[in-house]
Structure formats: structure tokens, C-alpha cells
Image: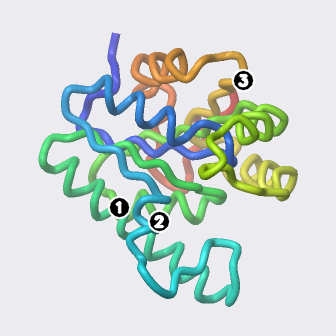
Amino acid sequence: MSTVGGPDCLLVTGMPGAGKSTVTRLVAQRLERSARLGGDEVNAMIVNGFVWALGEPADEAMRQVELLHRNLCALASNFCDAGFTPLIDAMIPSRERLDFFLELLAPRRLLFIVLAPGIDTCRYRNTIRDPGERFDFDGYDNLEATMKRELGNVGWWFDTATLTPEQTADRILQEAPSRARVSSAHEDGGGFG
């Protein structure tokens, strides 16, 4: 059976509380040569002047989101070219953002996974996080609708609601190469499942 271990680039997204950080960490630990690239950690490199993605001023927030994505792609490309599988943990709400990753990571293969355990599960998981890692977010309904509209037929929408993080990581290792492939804005495979 084919497994992750490329040097493919694995991009994992999902709503707050979906398990992106935990799962990318677990998958990375199971690979012989891997690097975990967390959007939050890369953003934390900004010492002064940081504006979060939904912050104000909005134009500066969007500029910093693009900077984050450029930095994640540059790191992923460097690790991939050195024979490491980069696991990118980032919020990707739209096809436009995904296409930005595809463009910057080309010609490397990108595997795209949307962790989709559902809104109630995401909210619950957020409540059981360490208090310093909780993320107060009230836009679940809008974010889910946007992601389904923009990305509903792209990559692998992976419902992890009944799985442990370890089971999720194991399935990603086994199934991502066949279920999570994306290549262009005209991708029509994958989707919910």
C-alpha cells in the first residue's frame, strides 16, 4: 500500500479545533524524514506589528496572511528539496488561497487534507485544549459554508469526529497519496468522504 513519505508536501487545514496541529505533529513523528510547519509558529516570528487574519486594518491582515503563506511555501519547498516531507498546518479557507500554495510549491506534488469533524466537535475540542492554546472563534457556520463552497470538491475532506488523533494520523499515512491529490484550479476529484 502506498503511504505518505514522499517528498510530497502535505497541507492540512480545517476549522479551529479540527486537530490540525495535533495531527500534523503525529504524522511527522511517524515519518523517517519530516518537518512540521505550523502557521501559528511562523506567525509568532513577527515580534512587533503582527495583525491576525481577521484583525484590523484588514488590508494589513491580508498582507500578513499572504506573507505567512509565502513563508510556509518557501520552508516547505526547501525541506521537500532536501528530502524531507513537509507537513503544513495552515488555515486555507478558499480555492484562491489553495491555488497560491499550488503555484508556489510547483513542481512539487501537494496533498491537501481538510480535517472535517464538524462544528460541534471542533467547538468541543477547543474547550478541552490547554487554556493557553484555546482559540475563541464564533464564525464556525460562515467558515464551514465558505470552505464547502470553495473547496468542497478538492482534496480529501476527512471526517475525523469519531477517530482519535492517532487513528487519524495512521489513516493519513495510508490514504493521503490516493485521496488528497490536487494539481490545479480545475481539480474536480476528491471531496467529502
Please give the name of the residue rendered at 44% of the width and 76% of the height, measured from the top-left corner: 67
Read off the residue under disc 2. 100
> Element at badge 2?
helix
Work out how far the residue at label 1 is from the one at label 3, CA to CA, in angstroms: 29 Å
| Disc nearest the viewer among 3 and 2 | 3
Give, as a three-letter code, the residue at label 2: Phe
Task: Kindly identify the amino acid type of the residue bearing the numbered disc 3.
Answer: Ala
Percent position of residue 13, x then y: 57, 46
At label 1, which amino acid type do we have? Cys
What residue is at 12 percent from the left and 48 percent from the top? 82
On screen, 60 above or below 69? Answer: below
Label 3: which secondary element? loop
Apparent side of residue 24 relative to residue 77 in the rendered image (left or right): right
> Label 3 belongs to which residue?
161
**Residue found at the very far top of the displayed protein:** 1
Upstream in the sequence, badge 1 or badge 3? 1
How many neighbours does mark 3 have within 10 angstroms: few (below 14), some (14-19), or many (20 or more)? Answer: some
- Callout 1: 10 Å neighbours few (<14), some, many (20+)? many
Residue 73: assigned label: 1
Residue 41: name its quadrant: bottom left
Q: Position of residue 189 (x, y in %)?
A: 58, 35
145 or 121: which is nearer to us?
A: 121
Asked if disc 1 and disc 2 are in contact, CB closer than 8 Å, the reply is yes
Regarding mark 1 in the picture, which secondary structure is present there? helix
Residue extending furthest front?
A: 131
